[in-house]
Image (spheres, grey):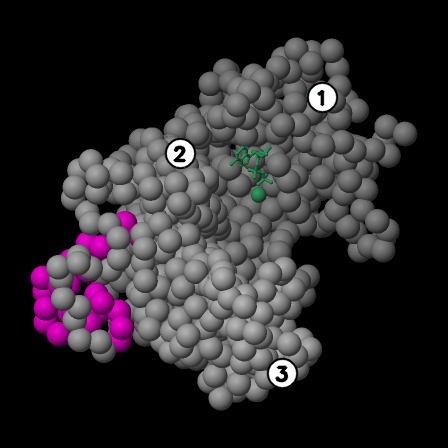
Amino acid sequence: MSESGLERTTETRLLPASNHPGAGDGLLSPLLSVERLEVQFRAKHGAVRAVNGVTFQVSSGEMLGLVGESGSGKSVTSLAIMRLFPRDGSVISMGRVWFDGQDILSIPEPAMRRLRGRDMAIVFQNPMTSLNPTMRVGLQIAEILMVHEGLGRRQAFERSEALLQMVGVPAVHESLAKYAHEFSGGMQQRITIAMALALQPRLLIADEPTTALDVTIQAQVLDLIRERAAETGMAVVLITHNLGVAAGLTQRIAVMYAGLLVEVGETRSIFASPRHPYTVGLLGSLPRADYHRVKLTPIPGMPPVQVEEPKGCPFAPRCARQISVCSTETPALRSMGRQVAKPSRAVPNTCSHLVACHNPVPTEETPLMPLGSRRD
Amino acid sequence: MARYIARRLVLMVIVLAGMSVLTFLLTHLVPGNPAKLMAGLHATQAQVDVYTRRYGLNKPLPVQYWRYVTGLTHGDFGTSLTTQRPVAEDLKQFAPATAELVFAAMVLTVVIGVPLGALSGLFHRSWFDHSTRVISVAGAAMPAFWLGMILQVVFFAKLGVLPVGGQLDILSQSPPTITGMVVVDSLLAGQFTVFRDALLHLILPAFTLAAGGIAIVTRMSRGAMEDTLETDFIRMARAKGMPELRVVGRHALPNALTSTVTVLGLQVGALFAGTFLVESVFTWPGIGLYAVTGIRDQDYAAIMGVTLLIAITYCLANLVVDVIYALMDPRITYAGT
Ligand SMILES: Nc1ncnc2c1ncn2[C@@H]1O[C@H](COP(=O)(O)OP(=O)(O)O)[C@@H](O)[C@H]1O
Ligand code: SF4
Ligand SMILES: [Mg+2]
């Protein structure tokens, strides 16, 4: 936990920071704006509500951490942004996803296809399965340049070689002719990053890019992403279930639970004064330097699978701060600084600290106690 | 790779040796006296004894087997009791017709089964997928002789569009023997009317033989395609903005085919087994028909000759398939193990 300079946070101190202006501020409009996104999977008995109305923005040059336990809807959100669901009607996406002024959810498929890979790119969790096992990696990179840029084979492979060099794959020329299984996990993920960055996208979504990797490799891959983001000024959505990973890299963090955002704010603010009981719990299950040998204390319970219309706070069954209104009214995201007039309709400001909770944790309380032990 | 093939060949010899013992025992342990069959219904004991001695049928089984195996190493498969000719010569005469039939059935299996399956997987749960499934389940469930007879009734008796029986019309002149396969030989000789006739004769038996395999390969490649389309690397290809045609044709299909190829190897064995019935139904002059006659007449040498020939072909076909599989999937290496 960072200490100095982060004394008790007052919300006003965290308002407009010049490098990432918010949507409502009339400055730059964000590159990506997700508004009330809902995603449902149609199943035999009703629909699985994976995402239940998520709203957030990301600006160019910014790195946003999308954090939450496994199953909270992070990957589904990212697939909705890339519009990568099967188009057979089994998945329904509602709401708006604005990317550079276009509504991603409603543009025709050919236009969407041109955006993918060129303007928005994604890196998935498992590099081994993300690479085509029977196609040489050189072609897997080069085809992006050939399809989007119309480059010839020779040029495309030359550029691919340069891309591999950039992401730190050794022996680039020989590597072009190799297959995915001939590389280590870390190298494979570098290759998928090279694929994602081939056309200098303006938005990169990295969905748990290091979860499948050795601990020793994780930092290297994260460094690579940070480095490339800093150099190109692209916006990054870094998805992780580990707040610790997000801590060092992101400017802002959005905490997701059961398909909803429960807390959004500047990374410093989230760490200094987490207000949502779930965020506090997540922070509590972070390993800390002083007792890193101790087994982590996870938040007791599991995130629910939403089948019915959510009623009340989805975290209520696991929450120690539950009050009577929690089980009847779903809390809306509210600014902890200035109260927005109509919280449910408002597009949350990117710079304020927003929390969806009827009984938020007071700023004074120590954030590092896991929920479980508090209940005991 | 070369070492792998060599090892597989050694293994194959062992398999064949075991195979020969097994068939030898089976054919010699069934009740009945082939010498009596050969000598005829009204033969005297003396006549039967002549046959018994000539073919060594009075010797102990191990001796008979040893004689048979040493003969094999010289390409001597023994003498057929029914045709009174060396089995090797019989096989040489009948094998090409079977090769032609099996090869044609294999081609049908691949060119019908793989695209049908791939398209069903691509458009899964569509009307196309559902009708393909119904047809392929029916195809797999229908016995070959039954299907063969239905096809004969429909296309020969009712519609009169396809011929039935043998490789050629009685009025057609056989082309000069080069490969022994009538379709190929007529083409090589430039006799196009004969070629057309041979091809028409081939369609029904080949399809009858292939039907079960088409059904299996269709369902296998459907599953392979469906599974492949759900993999991360397909999602990745889409995320890279690849056109759907490229996603399916260049990314999904080669990976789906890899797993289908292994099924084709097993299919070779099923096709040979099928020739026994199909050749009988269509009086196709191949080793299947030869073997069926041999079984009826307790013609040991003929049965064993056919069995060994099929076993060798089956082993070789599977070796070829494994090599193709290795070439298609770079993850497979044959070093070491
Ligand atoms: N293809 C699918 N069909 C049905 N439910 C799905 C599908 N994909 C994800 N889900 C459900 O959506 C929820 C969110 O999943 P996901 O976004 O993958 O979580 P995570 O935050 O771990 O990335 C989970 O409950 C999951 O079971
Ligand atoms: S709304 Fe109530 S139940 Fe939900 S997190 Fe806040 S206090 Fe807990
Ligand atoms: Mg995920």
- Please give the name of the residue rendered at 68% of the width and 50% of the height, measured from the top-left corner: A244
Lateral position of residue A139 relative to residue B21, left or right:
left
The picture places residue B114, in percent across and down from the top left corner, at 36, 52
Q: Nearer the viewer, mark 2 or mark 1?
A: 2
Instruction: Say few, some or many: other residues with alpha carbon within 10 Å of mark 3 (under 14 / 14 to 19 / 20 or more).
Output: few
Question: In terms of secondary structure, where does tag 2 sit?
Answer: helix
| Mark closer to the chain start, 3 or 2 | 3
Q: What is the chain identity of the residue bearing mark 2? A: B
Residue A172 found in image quarter: bottom left
Which mark is on residue B256? none
Q: What is the chain identity of the residue bearing mark 3? A: B
The picture places residue A91, in percent across and down from the top left corner, at 44, 30
Judge whether residue B127 can be spotted in this image: yes
Question: In terms of secondary structure, where does tag 3 sit?
Answer: helix
CB at mark 1 closer than 8 A to ligand 2?
yes
The picture places residue A217, in percent across and down from the top left corner, at 63, 65
Give, as a three-letter code, the residue at label 1.
Answer: Ala
Residue highlighted by disc 1: A316
The extreme bottom residue here reads: B74
The picture places residue A328, in percent across and down from the top left corner, at 66, 11
Q: Which residues are magenta?
A: B179-205
Give, as a three-letter code, the residue at label 2.
Answer: Val
> Is residue B168 magenta-colored?
no
Q: In terms of image quarters, where does ligand 1 lie? A: top right
- Please give the name of the residue rendered at 24% of the width and 50% of the height, measured from the top-left corner: B164
Q: Disc 3 versus disc 2: distance between alpha carbons?
A: 51 Å
Residue highlighted by disc 3: B66
The one of B162 and B55 positioned closer to us in this rendering? B55
Residue highlighted by disc 2: B134
